[in-house]
Image (tube, rainbow, N blue to C red):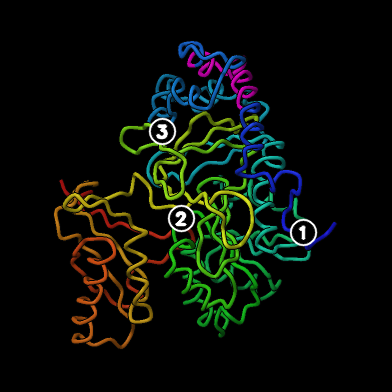
Amino acid sequence: MDTNRPYWNMEIEPLLNTPEMKKIQFDKLKKMLTRLKANAPFYTNMITKSGLDPDKLKSFEEFKDKITLFNKEALRNLVMDCGGDILKTLEQIMPVSVDDIDYMGTTTGTSGIPTPYPLTRRDIDKIWGEVMVRGSWRAGLRSHDRVLYCFALSMVIAGVPSLVGIQNLGCMILPVGAEAKSERILLMQALFKGTVYTGTPSLAEYLIEQSPKILGKPVGDLGFRALVCGGEPGAGIPEVKNKLEKAYGCRLYDSGAGFGFSCDCDEYQGMHWLGDDLCYYELVDPETKAPVPFTNGAEGEAVFTSLEGDGMALIRNSLGDIHKIFTNPCPCGRSGFRYKVIGRSDDMLKVKGVMVYPSGIKGVINEFVPRVTGELRIVLDERPPRVVPPLKIKVEYAEGTTPQQLEALAAEITESMSKRIKINPQIIWVEHGSLERSTYKGKTFEKTYENKK
């Protein structure tokens, strides 16, 4: 095996985002729709009522016109129709039996009921795991690497399913998990000298603070040569990316929100979509749900349709992520269109008609590190998305900062927020270390309205 080749899968990856790949996708789409119509009762009913004939399907446009979106609301409705029985629900939307499922992954469920990802071993090895390995290969991971695996291992798809998938690369996995907390994570790194960190950017930021306290040395001395982050915004925010790369002394790679993995360009270019042969990607308008033309710079809600899969068979499925896509060539020269996660529709705020996402706020705050720690909370006194201005943001200041310095710093932050994201927030200063840290996903909101009677 040539370890210097540009792609893990030299047969498929050079074809990503090409006219030839579109033909492969269309043939696979018709086969998947035929399979679902024959074996998944929910889709049997949907496809029949739509008037779509998989064998006679003429275009992707016809598919998008006749098949409606399946999102979290549709899943909740289906669960209710099945009497609250999630296993019965899965039998309605899978082309295989629940008895055929080998692993059950989910989303984290931070905004409601976790979305299930039922997976067969084939799904792990040939679909989810295949994309994980394609991305890991582009990030320079090889069989001699030791991966300190710090995503939560319990149920979430970034846990055991992704861990098992990465093993296809042949590297050593150190499955410590976010559940182990920072002291155990750092101890395992000290003992087994992982070369690659894999976990959330929030945890990676937290370890910057904890490593000197627990191990007596900075994270830059721990021996990592790459960071692979996902599960939340952060790795794709330039200010956070720069903070982590400077502290660890190595390249940071962003992954997730679909079959995506960022490249090794100095400047973040978004994540390359690596699964054209496995999943059809489209954008829709977040409000009207009408298709958005797939052109360079387009923004919309990301929608996925599985082209392969047993349990993991998604048809026009949306998890509510808002993406911006780039179809022009990447400076890295590698294949695949790219996308940036703008935010989640669930997290969007409207301040005097301006749409604001937490990732944008976090990006501005991290401009001011080390005068601030980078930790923040967006305070919501009323149920979102509408916010009566000013938007309140709690920000941790660095140790040794005087009240006079804080006054000037708040003015600087407000000015930057106004220029970059068009809001004038109220900065609420809190002491260094007072905001709770997380070994998994970072907490973004403080919802005071939930405490109101």
Circle nearer the N terminus (1, 3) = 1
Q: Quadrant of the N terminus?
A: bottom right
Which segment did they paint magenta?
29-46
Give coordinates of residue 438: x percent, y percent: 44, 63
Q: Quadrant of residue 334?
A: bottom right
Q: Is residue 164 left or right of residue 365?
A: right
User: Secondary structure under badge 3?
Assistant: loop
Circle nearer the N terminus (3, 2) = 2
Circle nearer the N terminus (1, 2) = 1
Query: Which numbered mark, 1 or 2, is in the foreground of this view?
Result: 1
* Residue sitting nearer the eye, 53 or 261: 53
**For residue 231, which numbered disc appears in the image?**
none
Residue named by callout 2: 232
| CA gap, disc 3 and disc 2 | 25 Å
Q: Main secondary structure of the magenta part?
A: helix
Which residue sits at x=59%, y=74%? 250
Q: Is residue 331 above or below residue 277?
A: below
Give coordinates of residue 295: x percent, y percent: 46, 44
Mark 2 and mark 3 in contact (Cβ < 8 Å)? no
List the single residue furthest toward the right: 1
